[in-house]
Image (tube, grey):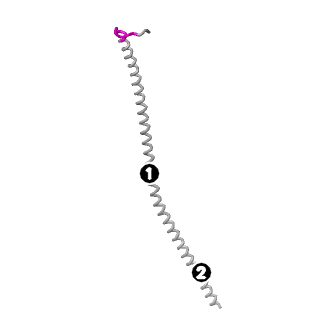
Amino acid sequence: MATNTVWIVIAVIAALIVIAALVWVGRNRQVSRRRAQAGEIREEVRLENVKVQRREALADETAAKARAAQAEAEAKAAEAARLEENAAQHRSVAAEQRGELDEKWSHADELDPEVEHQAK
């Protein structure tokens, strides 16, 4: 009977070894599948990352253009204000000169005996 017990123990040990081997192979397959899945996800992320980087670069470029346009608009507004001020100065000088000319014309009319003078 001792021989039968030895064979039973050997069979149980062999069965445990086979079960352990099957579990090990199953886990390795699962790990391999998960590793492959992670690799696919990483590749998708790499591809999407390129798209996102392009979009970020476009956003940066657009923001730079907006800043340049804003600076240009501010410069044009400053130039317009300067020109308005110059125009106002010219108008003021012209009005002053127009008044002086009108006074000279009136003085000439007063001196000219052929010009009819109205009573004041």
The amino acid beneath tag 1 is Leu
**Residue bearing the label numbered 2:** 16
Helix, strand or loop for disc 2 = helix
The amino acid beneath tag 2 is Leu
Residue at x 49% of width, y 63% of height:
42
Give yes or no for residue 113 being in the magenta stretch. yes
Q: Is residue 22 left or right of residue 80?
A: right
Disc marking residue 82: none
Residue at x 42% of width, y 39% of height:
72
Residue at x 39% of width, y 10% of height:
117
Q: Report the predominant secondary structure element of the magenta stretch.
A: loop
Where residue 11 sits: x, y (%)? 60, 85
Helix, strand or loop for disc 1 = helix
| Number of numbered callouts drawn | 2
Residue at x 58% of width, y 79% of height:
19
Where residue 52 sits: x, y (%)? 47, 56
- Above or below residue 10? Residue 99 is above
Q: Earlier in the sequence, mark 2 or mark 1?
A: 2
Q: Is residue 15 left or right of residue 106?
A: right
Residue 18 placement: quadrant: bottom right
Disc marking residue 58: 1
Give yes or no for residue 107 being in the magenta stretch. no
Magenta residues (range):
109-117
